[in-house]
Image (cartoon, rainbow, N blue to C red):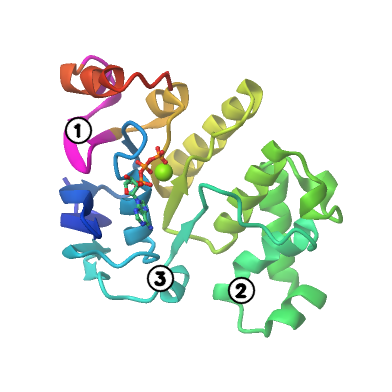
């Protein structure tokens, strides 16, 4: 195996008396789509928020591209090539589709924010148009983000994250609330980004149809612990995984 792009070691996060993530370790290999799954409350988003530096871990370490980022600022991450989306959408409702996507280029564009939106460099605009074409939003450039239906808002968040030209893309439940047709499209986009452009993706997701279809490797969490890890075919039949899902009466399949 090559050097991991992401190396999580003994990550622990406590909220008061609750241990949300408990000595979690796993590695993500470059160019792979790596899924992090598990029942509700397993600690997936908490782990995700530590990697994107929105939460500070209680203990343990996180290395990105060989560098310890455990104490880095969230704001620095985009500049290092790490992009994320949010479990709950975080778009600028009053800005247009094009403007929302352009904001993604801000991390490497030298221009001031107002200028970036009023007079974006041709290079940024072209890049953003290419991405909006890819996610099916090129006909909505001037529409306000708030006027889009939910599925298109999720696609806009994806385009904005891709606009930073990430090496590592962190996605928290990108398929939640999407229709089957939209999930198929997401499947195709992510598979292509990984296979053709070598993008690494860490995917937190409950929609098993997507997880099983696109993931190279899957880490399974339950009650803050890693309970299994492997290729989709192994995870599908793993007794501990089946037990963790069925044991809680969740029906995310
Ligand atoms: N900021 C916080 N303060 C206190 N407790 C928190 C906080 N964030 C998460 N938790 C708790 O930590 C545990 C793990 O939550 P987390 O959101 O990481 O789960 P998850 O695996 O993402 O679940 P879901 O699939 O429902 O999104 C839960 O018990 C949750 O209530
Ligand atoms: Mg979550």
The residue at which mark 1 appears reads as 229
Q: Viewer-proximal residue, 49 or 117?
A: 49
Q: Secondary structure at mark 1?
A: strand
**Which contiguous range is marked in magenta?**
218-237
Q: Quadrant of residue 252?
A: top left
Residue at 72% in and 77% down: 116
Where is residue 228 drawn, in percent x and y? 18, 31
Q: Looking at the rendering, which quadrant does residue 213 occupy?
A: top left
**Alpha carbon of mark 2 to alpha carbon of mark 3: how far?**
13 Å
For the residues labelled 2 and 1, say whether their Cβ atoms are less than 8 Å apart.
no
Position of 251 with respect to 237 (left or right) is right
Rendered image: mark on residue 106:
2
Specify the farthest residue to the front: 17
Residue 80: mark = 3
C-alpha span from label 3 to label 1: 27 Å
Tell me, yes or no, whether the highlighted magenta stretch contains residue 19: no
- The tag earlier along the polypeptide, 2 or 1, is 2
């Amino acid at each position: 195996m090559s050097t991991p792009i992401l190396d999580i070691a003994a990550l622990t996060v406590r909220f008061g008396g609750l241990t949300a993530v408990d000595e979690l370790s796993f590695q993500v290999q470059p160019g792979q789509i790596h899924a992090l799954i598990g029942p509700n409350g397993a600690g997936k988003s908490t782990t995700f928020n530590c990697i994107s530096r929105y939460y500070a871990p209680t203990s343990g370490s996180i290395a990105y591209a060989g560098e310890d980022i455990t104490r880095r600022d969230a704001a620095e991450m985009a500049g290092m090539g790490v992009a994320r989306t949010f479990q709950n959408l975080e778009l600028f409702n009053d800005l247009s589709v094009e403007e929302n996507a352009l904001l993604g280029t801000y991390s490497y564009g030298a221009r001031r924010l107002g200028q970036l939106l009023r007079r974006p460099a041709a290079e940024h605009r072209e890049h953003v148009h290419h991405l909006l074409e890819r996610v099916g939003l090129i006909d909505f450039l001037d529409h306000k983000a708030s006027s889009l239906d939910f599925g298109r808002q999720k696609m806009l968040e994806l385009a904005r994250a891709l606009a930073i030209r990430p090496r590592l893309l962190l996605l928290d439940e990108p398929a939640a609330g999407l229709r089957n047709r939209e999930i198929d499209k997401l499947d195709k986009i992510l598979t292509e980004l990984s296979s053709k452009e070598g993008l690494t993706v860490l995917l937190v997701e409950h929609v098993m149809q997507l997880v099983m279809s696109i993931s190279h490797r899957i880490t399974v969490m339950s009650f803050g612990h890693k309970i299994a890890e492997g290729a989709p075919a192994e995870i599908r039949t793993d007794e501990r995984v089946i037990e963790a899902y069925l044991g809680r009466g969740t029906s995310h399949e």
